[in-house]
Image (cartoon, rainbow, N blue to C red):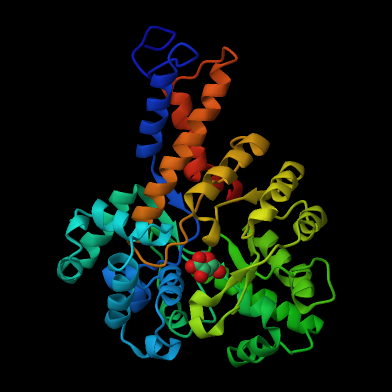
Amino acid sequence: MKKDGTAGSKGPYGRDNIEALREAVAAVVARTPITDIHTHLFAPPFGGLLLYGVDELITYHYCIAEALRASDVPYDTFWNMDKRGQADLIWKELFIDRSPVSESCRGVLTALDKLGLDVASRDLAAYRAYFADADLAAHIDNVFACAGLTSVVMTNDPFDETERPVWERGFEGDERFRAALRIDPLLLDWKNTAPRLQGWGYDADAMLSPNARAEVRRFLSDWIKKTKSLYMAVSLPPTFAYPSDTEYSTLLDECVVPVAQEHNVPFAMMIGVKRNVNPGIRLAGDGVGQGDVGAVERLCAAYPDAKFMVTMLSRENQHELCVAGRKFRNLFLFGCWWFLNDPSLIEEITRMRLELLGLSVLPQHSDARVLEQVVYKWSHSRTIIAKVLADKYADLAGTGWTIDEAEIERDVARLFGGNFWNFIA
Ligand code: RAT
Ligand code: ZN
């Protein structure tokens, strides 16, 4: 009953009914729909770029890294296998010869289980048959429903030769697969990017003359419009420095930030990846290093009217980044990225963020590269977010504060996407 006597939200919950409070939080977190703000998934018109199915799940690069530690197969032999052969090897090494306790392996099993497959059977052939028989459109609906997603944000790379033509043919967008313009080559490999821009009709000389800067702005504007991107994004190394005597620093000041402001889109920085620490294992060969939160602070201070979304890869950066978040309303913290997407770390980081920043963050994104991964990543994260949030409400209840179900729903809706939509509005 509501205070005015009408039927409505359940509660209030407080110090006298903590267990009911915890149950209510778990239920709300379990049913609240999510906007997944960073994935590597694609809408069906992108064809083979949308990865799905059990062989893709097993050959996720997170699993490859683990399998190539377990196995002594030469890297070249592994890479010369077809996808199915690679999946067979990983399945044997990580699921049959030892128990699949890592988060990446557990994730494969959660996804299969939630899609209704019998994980206890360990019957890889049966899993393959399930996906082979699936109708893709219906399967996507099912996966979105299973994960409780309303939409996912793709990672859209105008420099990718497979993806580019789909946009150029006039892909109009999809309500469930929203776009984000990914610009790593522009910022991190300017020398090789300038000639490509020239080839596409942008008069951008490698010296970054004033004219070239204007042309880069035109390129970014064109692609934001073409893709209806919700934000621009880059993954950056731990050495990222701002301001600095680098091409990317100039490009940020002269091109990216002005275009972000003009189109009112945030610029997302994912900081801390050391690319190719072990090139032999390809995509699985990237590592992590501690970044400089000062670079983020200086960018936020230099452009108070621009919006920055940041996630950092190193655990050691998380506290400093939270404190930076307290200083800048134009800094939006999101997700437990990649090597941080593990239960113990998600819990630690989410707790720290709520304690330092209240409900003003977006605790998680999936980074899914394979469609069904959203099922496991969100199932695992929902459990942890519910636990942390319930602890925080219980602490409040200890003061005599009470909360009702509608307020819990409001808070969770913010954490599962509302804060993002407000930030970009
Ligand atoms: O999480 C990943 O799968 C990484 O390989 C990267 O894609 C990273 O998330 C990125 O977007 O750079
Ligand atoms: Zn990613």
* x and y, in percent, of residue 187 in the image: 68, 76
Residue 117 visible? The answer is no
* x and y, in percent, of residue 95 in the image: 30, 65
Q: Check the image and report above or below for 87 versus 415.
A: below
Q: Which of 124 and 304 lies nearest the eye of the viewer?
A: 124
Q: Which of 7 and 269 lies nearest the eye of the viewer?
A: 269
Residue at 24% across, 53% down: 113
Report whether 367 appears left or right of 295. left
Q: Check the image and report above or below for 14 versus 204.
A: above
Residue 243 visible? The answer is yes
Q: In which quarter of the image is residue 215?
A: bottom right
* x and y, in percent, of residue 97 in the image: 30, 68
Residue at 60% across, 78% down: 277
Residue at 55% across, 49% down: 345
**Quadrant in which the N terminus is drawn:** top left
Report whether 61 appears left or right of 371. right
Q: In which quarter of the image is residue 193?
A: bottom right
Report whether 77 appears left or right of 294. left
* x and y, in percent, of residue 87 in the image: 30, 76
Q: Which of 98 and 323 lies nearest the eye of the viewer?
A: 98
Which residue is outermost to the top? Answer: 5
Total tally of numbered discs in the picture: 0
